[in-house]
Image (tube, rainbow, N blue to C red):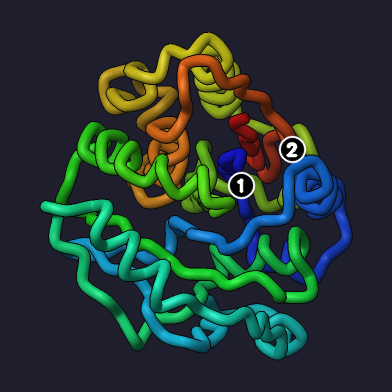
């Protein structure tokens, strides 16, 4: 099974029609239909590592200030306690605690409803331990590679360039609009991705001010690191939805395999 990193952008992408949601729909047609999905979302950032283990995860509307139409959206996919247990076992000796309270946050359902609108595929979420450095997450992801052989789709959901404080509100819907530092961050991270120079991405904090502006906090960046950790040497990496928007966000998404 291929691996995906999805630049999820604004929660409004869940209900709007634009080039990015078209990209999500198109990519789902390019890969086999998965038996189940593991989503590593920027919006489940925890002290320790957790996995959702309920039969029916709730749809979490973890945002505010948006229209009622968005809060009305439900994504009624089943969970998979069996996959949660298998994931926990694969990640040993790291302690992975089963969670029965979280559900599917908007980093998961806002993109999944475009990939699989029927919500007919079981979905679990794996949290990101904010106490650990990027190299830890890259190495941890490798332990999940066996799940790909079982038809499990592993999705990272975040944004490579994500600085909400510096959004250019005049161009919030302008595809291609980016500050100079965001343009540089997109170009250089894309080059490192396509060249397989993943260590520079793992060590992103050492790469200069342009990436410090692009990644002021690690939550939206680390889901991509999980995807890179799952890439086999022989696999192709390709980009889609590769545009800046609103000055300080990139929707760049990645397909591996």
Coordinates of residue 169 in the picture (x, y in percent): 67, 52
Above or below: residue 201 compared with residue 111: above
Residue 144 relative to residue 154: left or right = left
Number of numbered discs present? 2
228 displayed left or right of 238: left
Label 2 residue SS: loop
Residue 179 or 123: which is nearer the viewer? 123
- Residue 64, position in %: x, y? 55, 80
Furthest-front residue in this view: 150
> How far apart, in angstroms, are the residues tagged by discs 2 and 1?
9 Å
Locate residue 10, reporting x and y percent: 64, 60
Q: Position of residue 86 (x, y in %)?
A: 33, 63
Q: Residues within 10 Å of mark 2 (few under 14, many from 20)?
A: some
Which label belongs to residue 6? 1
Task: Report the front residue among 1 and 141.
Answer: 1
- Find residue 179 and report its image quarter: top right
| Sequence order check, earlier mark of 2 and 1 | 1
Numbered circle sitting on residue 241? 2
Quarter of the N terminus within the rendering:
top right
**Viewer-nearest residue: 101 or 32:** 32
**Residue 13 seen in render:** yes
Q: Residues within 10 Å of mark 1 (few under 14, many from 20)?
A: many
Question: Mark 2–mark 1 contact, CB under 8 Å?
Answer: yes
Q: Quadrant of the C terminus?
A: top right
Determine the residue positioned at 46% across, 80% down. Answer: 103
Q: Nearer the viewer, residue 130 or 39?
A: 39
Q: Is residue 8 above or below residue 177?
A: below
**Which residue is found at the position 26% from the left and 35% from the top?**
139
């Amino acid at each position: 099974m291929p691996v995906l990193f999805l630049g999820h952008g604004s929660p409004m992408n869940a209900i709007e029609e634009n080039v990015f949601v078209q990209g999500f729909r198109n990519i789902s047609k390019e890969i086999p239909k998965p038996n189940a999905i593991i989503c590593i979302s920027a919006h489940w950032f925890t002290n320790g590592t957790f996995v959702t283990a309920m039969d029916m995860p709730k749809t979490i509307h973890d945002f505010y200030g948006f229209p009622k139409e968005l809060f009305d959206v439900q994504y009624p996919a089943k969970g998979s306690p069996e996959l949660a247990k298998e994931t926990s076992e694969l990640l040993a000796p790291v302690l992975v605690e089963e969670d029965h309270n979280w559900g599917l946050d908007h980093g998961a359902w806002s993109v999944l409803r475009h990939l699989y609108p029927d919500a007919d595929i079981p979905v679990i979420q794996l949290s990101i331990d904010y106490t650990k450095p990027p190299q830890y997450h890259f190495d941890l992801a490798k332990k999940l590679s066996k799940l790909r052989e079982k038809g499990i789709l592993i999705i990272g959901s975040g944004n490579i360039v994500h600085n909400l404080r510096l959004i250019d509100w005049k161009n919030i819907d302008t595809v291609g609009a980016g500050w100079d530092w965001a343009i540089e961050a997109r170009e250089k991270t894309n080059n490192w991705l396509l060249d397989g120079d993943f260590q520079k991405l793992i060590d992103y904090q050492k790469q200069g001010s342009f990436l410090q502006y692009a990644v002021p906090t690690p939550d939206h960046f680390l889901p991509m690191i999980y995807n890179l950790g799952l890439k086999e040497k022989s696999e192709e990496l390709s980009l889609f939805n590769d545009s800046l928007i609103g000055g300080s966000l990139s929707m760049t998404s990645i397909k591996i395999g």
